Amino acid sequence: MSSLPPKPATADTGYITQPASLENTYTSDKSLQRSLKWYVPSAMLRAAEPQFTQLGDEAVSEQVREWSADAERNQPYVKSHNVWGKRYDYDRLITTEGWKQLGHWGARNKIVSAGYDLSLGSHRRTIQYTLNYLYAPSSGLYSCPISMTDGAAFILSSKIGDLPSEHPFHAVFKGLVSEKDDHWTSGQWMTERAGGSDVQNTETWATYSPLPSSSGADPLGDGDYLINGFKFFSSATDANVALLLAKTPSGQLSTFLAPLRRTIIGDDGVTRQVSNGVRIHRLKNKLGTKELPTAELELQDMRAHLVGKLDQGIVTIAPLLNVTRIHTFIGSLAGWRRAISITKSFAKARSTVGEPLWLIPMHLRLLADLEVKHRGGMNLAFFTVALMGLVEGGASQPSELAHLPRPGKEANVVFRTLTATAKAVISKMSTYGIQECQEAMGGVGYMDEPDEPEFNISRILRNNSVNSIWEGTTNVLASEMARFLLKTGNLEIFSSWLGRTLALVQAENLRGPLSKAWSALQARFSPKNQPPATIVADARRYMFTLAWILCGTLLALDAERDQDAASKEIARRWILSAEGGVGDMVFHDIVTVQESESAQSHRDDHLEWDCRIAWGIELPENRASGHRSLQTTGSKL
């Protein structure tokens, strides 16, 4: 019997990995589905499901992938002068058709407007951020201007009720929440060279200088203040309007809103648009978010409107930060989920040492670990989103969900603490998690093909890395959280809520370690035991330890809602085995592996639970071994 000679591979023949197309995130993400069933009434969720499903389908469609690829391939640039050397009436920021279409796609899917749909009551934010969760990883970073647009809309929504109907802020708000292709976006300009996160060092100044009379052509462009200064990081440079901070002659900060362009009537009687004193100094060259135009802007006599009270800029603009921080951690989790999906698709298509990668024990454990950590982040995220709905709606009666804070001061304190904590911790967790997904694919995970966004984890990682920086770095947010809780009464209010919530956990073996950890952390945090400066110096550990306790509590309560077996195992691993996603930044004498659980990772059914958590199925009887040297007769799949 003759055997055929071996056939060498060529560039076009031989083994080629062919992963399956990505699934619809809404229909495949169990963590998202559980969060929605917990926080959204069943009738409202049923009504929203068709839109969620459609958006999930569109997010992995060929059309959206092409728009995303176009935005990455053809990055924005600026033209300030025409071919003859004449300066344009305003700097031309050139963005691609793909970038523009991604924005229109978001507006049509109510990415901003759902947050202002009063028919959804206190659940409108949960609906809105679910849409953002599905939209963000396919948006080509248009989710960034969306977040600032939402923040601006949020601030204006609280102001326009007291303004006359002809005030231009009404038209601005309408544009920001529009679901049509003529929708508006807003920038957020605070960062400067001197100040960074310390906005009190702002070098931008506002002078009260109203026009003698309105031109009538553009009320929005006829603001009473002239702004002069230099903004060092300005995302959403192609926005219609911007919210910004500037100092008035008192030396205090105020918040202003200004259009980037004004409409004027020229000497020839023709209406045209000109720059509103905004000159693009240069676009930033960044590690990631390259499709997103970020610029240094020089402001020269930019006409602007005061927002809120004079010299109360921080108080006025602070609510915007809550909104953008929520967008940030929702986007982080969405990018992480996309990376997990890519990694799983690869594992299903790949074999190594003669065995399917998705069943090799070490790889299976990695996938399960990623799911545990992501579930913890999702629980913290959607709790915070639900809490925003409670705070924003001004509810007077407690929620039907016993673990939500009581309306009023308690809800405000918990929300203020969690927006900083969730943004910092989830952003950091997701960057680590996405890097693990990249590594799990070997060399192909390191590839960065702009034409192939479907499986490009490198692009996800590059873009996600900024989430630990913008809207407050980890250190800035940790300091903010610690200083807020050190203010008179805040820690006591927060502790009252958390203690009451911990008592809701029925399983003593889970409640005990969490309660013990919180008691230890609270005692250590007390100014009676150490100076506030020492507490702030260690604020990262306080924040990440608190996040571990919060996630563990929410995971336990989630599992006990329906006694779901996989959810109970996820909670057990997070709490008892200290397998949470907060790593080396916790206090390790507080977040500890329980003695009764120290050997649990070696128990016979641990691998079976890995498979249930990672894949939602039972581990096949003829399981993989992980290496040829470990294979026995009949063990190879």
Image (cartoon, helix red, strand yellow):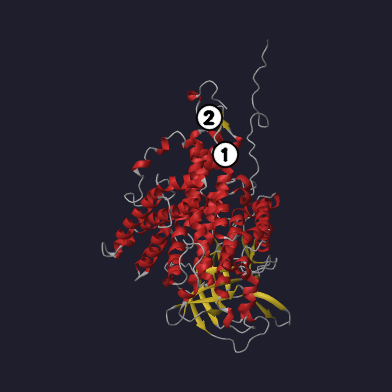
Q: What's under tag 2, amino acid-wise?
A: Ala
Q: Amino acid at mark 1?
A: Ile
Counting other residues with Cα less than 10 Å from the Cα at mark 1, is it few (<14), some (14-19), or many (20 or more)? Answer: few
Q: Which mark is residue 624?
A: 2
Which numbered disc, 2 or 1, marks the residue closer to the eye?
A: 1
Q: Is residue 373 above or below residue 539?
A: above
For mark 2, does the 10 Å Cα neighbourhood hold few (<14), some (14 to 19), or many (20 or more) residues?
A: many
- Residue in the foreground of this view, choosing between 195 and 633: 633
Image quadrant where residue 174 sits: bottom right
Residue 457 as seen in the image, left or right of residue 468: right
Report x, y in % for residue 601. 42, 38
The residue closer to the viewer here, 373 or 596, is 596
Q: CA distance from mark 2 to mark 1?
A: 15 Å
Q: Which residue is located at x 44 percent, y 66 percent?
A: 416
Q: Quarter of the image containing the N terminus?
A: top right
Residue 236 in view of the camera = no
Badge 1 is on which residue?
A: 617
Question: Is there any visible trace of residue 44 in the rendered image?
Answer: yes
Across and down, in percent, residue 196 comes to 44, 65
